Amino acid sequence: MPEDTANWTFVVARVEHGWRTQEDFAKAYDAAALVLRSKAQISVRQIRRWESGQTTWPNRDAREVLSEMFGVPLEQLGFVPPASKSTRLGALTDFKPDLEDHVLRRTFVGGLLAAPLLDLAALDHLAAAARDAHRYTDQQLVGHLSSALDETARTDVLTGPHRAMPAALGILSVISTNARDAKPEIRQQLLGLGSRAAELTAWLHRDAGSPQQTITYWHNQSKEWATFTGDGAMHAYVLLRQAQALGRHDPARILALADAATGGPWTLPPRPRAEALQQKARGLAMTGASESEIERALAEAHAALDQAAEPYGPVTCAGPLGDGYTRDRLMVQSGICWREAHCPDKAVTVFQTYITTTAFGARDHAHYSAFLAGALAEAGEPDEAAAVALGALDVAGPPRYGQAITELHRTAQILFPHRERHAVRELHERLVVLVAS
């Protein structure tokens, strides 16, 4: 499949829907055609023609079946109506400026509508980011935005997503505005950085408790820009992050996304591959797989991490993907897998061994401690569970680290039968106050 003409948009959509091979897709297509009572027939050869870009617009019967299978207009699958062949979305290296301008303008307008309400100080951050952009040459602007993105991530770690959100949106605004008229090589760099910024913004929205559609919007934007720049690894990484963003909702989709991240037409670097394999293990646990299946997936994750080189410098948003994924993090997340597999005692042992202040900063320590508290509650240790949960709440409460707080609410629900105990009652009361404040 020549990279300069391939319809990667269609390939990606196929894989994301769980049809990992062309043969899988052919079977699903024939089943959909049967339901529609369509005479459309498909062969693997025809699928190859679609994915190679040799066929830019399927025939009428095929269009009906494809629309039913994917639930979106064919243009969103990389196909182009005969009247507009020059702007086929699927061609990564033949992307036309007029279409790109349309996408970039749509991007930030949609983002602002989806973003949470911002106060005056937040709006000042947005205005400052846009106002300062003109001071830099093209290459300086890329460096400036890269540094700003790293600072935004640090703000999130130290003070929470609500403080970091305005800066993230400001960065996206500057990228959206400046990429339209930038030289091709600078546009490529800006959109690559924009993909990282959009993924971070999805994370911030998730931690801030935004609606799922808002989180999905920014994940899709990140994938779109990764597609435009030909960054398959980044696209796969966002699939992993989408799986994580589902939390405990829709286990089958969590497993499918993790599978797509590790098995699609891309290659993840060792560290994010290890993280994706761990997420696959969690999906297996949530869908009732055996302990041996979970152990095999975790063993694959450790094997991937064995292949990773040590980071050359500090972990940054614009640096190598997943450079912050360590052995300690893999072990702690393995504990989450065992908890999902209804093995709380095993999870507690892992958590207590690997959740340390040496391995994790305050935010991550609180986040994982919330999982430890839940495992202790499930293991029949209500007093210890409540004590650990209260310690995590001390850290997660003031900056409102959403994911940790969500997990603490789950722990409180498990502990509800023990609400007469002093520590358990205190946990419930403090969570009520936090929600009300």
Image (cartoon, rainbow, N blue to C red):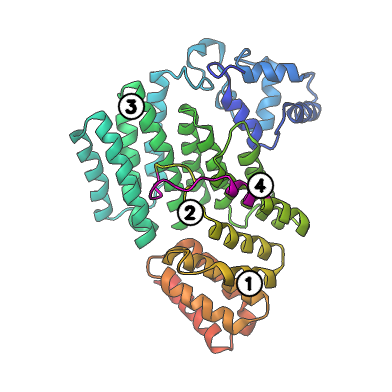
Judging from the image, what secondary structure is the residue with disc 4 in? helix
- Residue 253's mark? 4
Mark 2 or mark 3, earlier in chain: 3
- Residue 114's mark? none
- Residue type at mark 1 is Val
Q: Is residue 3 left or right of residue 205?
A: right
Q: Which one is closest to the eye, mark 2 or mark 1?
A: 1
- Residue at (80%, 25%) from the top-left corner? 37
Mark 1 or mark 3, earlier in chain: 3
* Most common SS among magenta residues: loop
User: Which of 40/21 is in front?
Assistant: 21
Judging from the image, what secondary structure is the residue with disc 1 in? helix
User: Which of 318/49 is in front?
Assistant: 318
Q: Which one is closest to the eye, mark 3 or mark 4?
A: 3
- Residue at (66%, 55%) from the top-left corner? 282
User: Which of 314/202 is in front?
Assistant: 314
Mark 3 or mark 4, earlier in chain: 3
Residue at the spot of label 1: 348
Q: Which one is closest to the eye, mark 1 or mark 4?
A: 1
Q: CA distance from mark 1 to mark 3?
A: 49 Å
Give the quarter of the image for residue 28. top right
Residue 229: x and y in percent read: 45, 28
Q: Is residue 106 left or right of residue 255?
A: left
Q: Are marks 1 and 4 in contact (CB under 8 Å)?
A: no
Q: CA distance from mark 3 to mark 4?
A: 36 Å
Residue at the spot of label 2: 206
Judging from the image, what secondary structure is the residue with disc 2 in? helix
Residue at the spot of label 3: 186
